[in-house]
Image (spheres, rainbow, N blue to C red):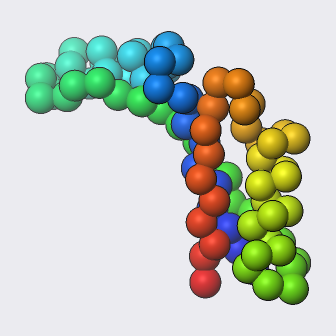
């Protein structure tokens, strides 16, 4: 089974990389660009009996390593 985990900074947390990307895009003439938030996507292959078990284990991985629960939020999508 494959999963895609999307990790983003929580609202209100300063996203310096997103700000830098936004400024660069505007500097290149993309004046229509507003706020930019930058995150990460992690793809994981996992052996699990079913989708519920996979999501539970992936959630544990996120809480322990893949995301900082203080400053980041995450979503888990199972991929066919």
| Image quadrant in which the N terminus is located | bottom right
Pick the front one: 27 or 10: 10
| Residue at image coords 12%, 29% | 32
Residue 5 x/y as whole percent: 64, 55
Q: Quadrant of residue 21?
A: top left
Asked if residue 11 can be seen in this view, the reply is: yes
Please tell me whether residue 77 is drawn above or below residue 30 in the rendered image.
Answer: below
| Image quadrant in which the C terminus is located | bottom right
Please tell me whether residue 31 is drawn above or below residue 58 in the rendered image.
Answer: above
Q: Quadrant of residue 64?
A: top right
Residue 51 x/y as whole percent: 73, 79
Residue 15 x/y as whole percent: 49, 19
Asked if residue 28 can be seen in this view, the reply is: no
Left or right: residue 54 compared with residue 32: right
Pick the front one: 80 or 29: 80
| Residue at image coords 79%, 59% | 58
| Residue at image coords 71%, 74% | 2
| Residue at image coords 63%, 32% | 72
Please tell me whether residue 56 is drawn above or below residue 30 in the rendered image.
Answer: below
Residue 49 x/y as whole percent: 87, 85
Pick the front one: 17 or 79: 79
Left or right: residue 56 compared with residue 14: right
């Amino acid at each position: 089974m494959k999963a895609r985990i999307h990790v983003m900074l929580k609202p209100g947390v300063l996203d310096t990389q997103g700000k830098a990307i936004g400024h660069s895009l505007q500097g290149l003439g993309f004046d229509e660009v507003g706020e930019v938030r930058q995150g990460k996507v992690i793809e994981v292959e996992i052996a699990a009996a079913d989708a519920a078990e996979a999501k539970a284990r992936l959630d544990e991985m996120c809480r322990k390593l893949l995301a900082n629960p203080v400053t980041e939020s995450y979503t888990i999508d199972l991929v066919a």
